[in-house]
Image: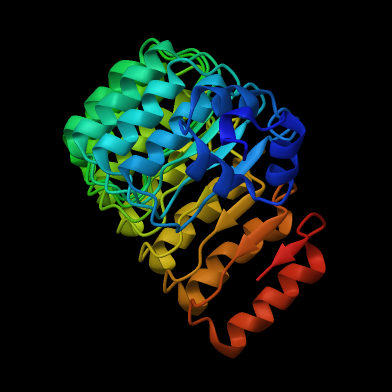
Amino acid sequence: MPSCFSTLPVEFIYRILDNLDEFTILYSTRNVCARLNSITDTYHRYQTLEYLKLRDNNISEQGAKYLADALASNTTLTTLILFDNELGDKGAQHIANALAINRTLMTLSLKRNHIEPEGAQYVANALSRNTALIRLALSANNIGNDGAQHLANALANNTTLTKLIMVQNGIGNQGVQYIANSLKNNTTLTKLNLVNNQITHLGARYLSDALSCSKALTKLHLNHNNIGAEGAKHIANALINNTTLIKLDLSHNGIRSDGAQSIANALTSNRVLTVLNLSCNDIRAEGARHLADALIRNTTLTTLELSRNDIGLRGVQNLADAIIHNTTLTMMNLKWNQIEDQGAQIVANIASKNTTLTLLS
């Protein structure tokens, strides 16, 4: 009489599992029967699996449920990459339910999964209870300002998350205000990425207020927004007294020379910022002059990105003396600035006289 699956020796099932990849196992066999759940929960390969990447696999709500069921009892997985799938809000809910229970997962990427405010709320609720996750990526969804509010509420109480990536989510100024308010009391988030979120000078002001209070944030990415010169002034005001931020990306924000002047003024007082990206901001020669004045006095900046700013020959001339005598810069980017032949000669002179630059391009 043939054996049924539920009575097969466990060794036979192990042999079958040895010839399947993790995705097939997780996706296809979960909840087939209670005994199989028990076997896969104790299977030796599952006891060591730490990294699972299932990018671009058309995983939908049902697949998310299978994964969530496994995640709820898994004690080894530390990284789960699910971007470019079709989870949606319900799929996010399944993953969030598992997060509320799981105590080992540290990195979760749900990038490009059609998650809207409802899905963000599920994830936020899980963050309020989860004590293990330290990196969360929600880029290229559509959580909007309502979703940002849910996440901000979670950040107010969460004590483990250190990195939050929210690129291209349409959170706008209102969403930034929610996030900024949560940063005032949060003591663990060190990296915040808000690239391409329709943030203007108003949102920059909210972030400035947060930076003035924050005791944790070390890296802030605001590139591809539209904060302009006024927004740059707000950020600069915070930089004067901020003691934690070491990396700031304001590229593609239209800050122009006035915004560069505000940032430059802050650099003369700031003693912690080491990496600054002002690429694609149309600062021109005048903006370069303001930054040159700051470089003479600043003693901490090691990386300065100024590509695509149309600083021209005069801008390089403005920067030259400051860079030659600066003793902290190790990397500077001047690409695509129309400096022409004479400007190239000046750059060559800088390279021959500066004693700390290791990369000048």
- The location of residue 294, given as percent across then percent down, is 54, 46
Q: Residue placed at 25% from the left, 37% from the top? A: 89
Say which of 192 and 322 sits in front. Answer: 192
Q: How is the image coloured?
A: rainbow
For residue 47, which quarter of the picture?
top right
Say which of 67 and 83 sits in front. Answer: 67
Q: Is residue 99 visible?
A: yes
Say which of 265 and 328 sits in front. Answer: 328
Q: Residue placed at 20% from the left, 42% from the top? A: 172
Q: Is residue 208 left or right of residue 193?
A: left
For residue 66, which quarter of the picture?
top left
User: Is residue 120 shown above or below 354?
Assistant: above
Q: Residue placed at 75% from the left, 48% from the top? A: 327
Say which of 100 and 347 sits in front. Answer: 100
| Quadrant containing the C terminus in the rendered view | bottom right
Q: Is residue 149 left or right of residue 192?
A: left
Q: Is residue 24 left or right of residue 211?
A: right
- The location of residue 251, given as percent across then percent down, is 41, 56
For residue 206, which quarter of the picture?
top left
- The location of residue 146, given as percent across then percent down, is 17, 31
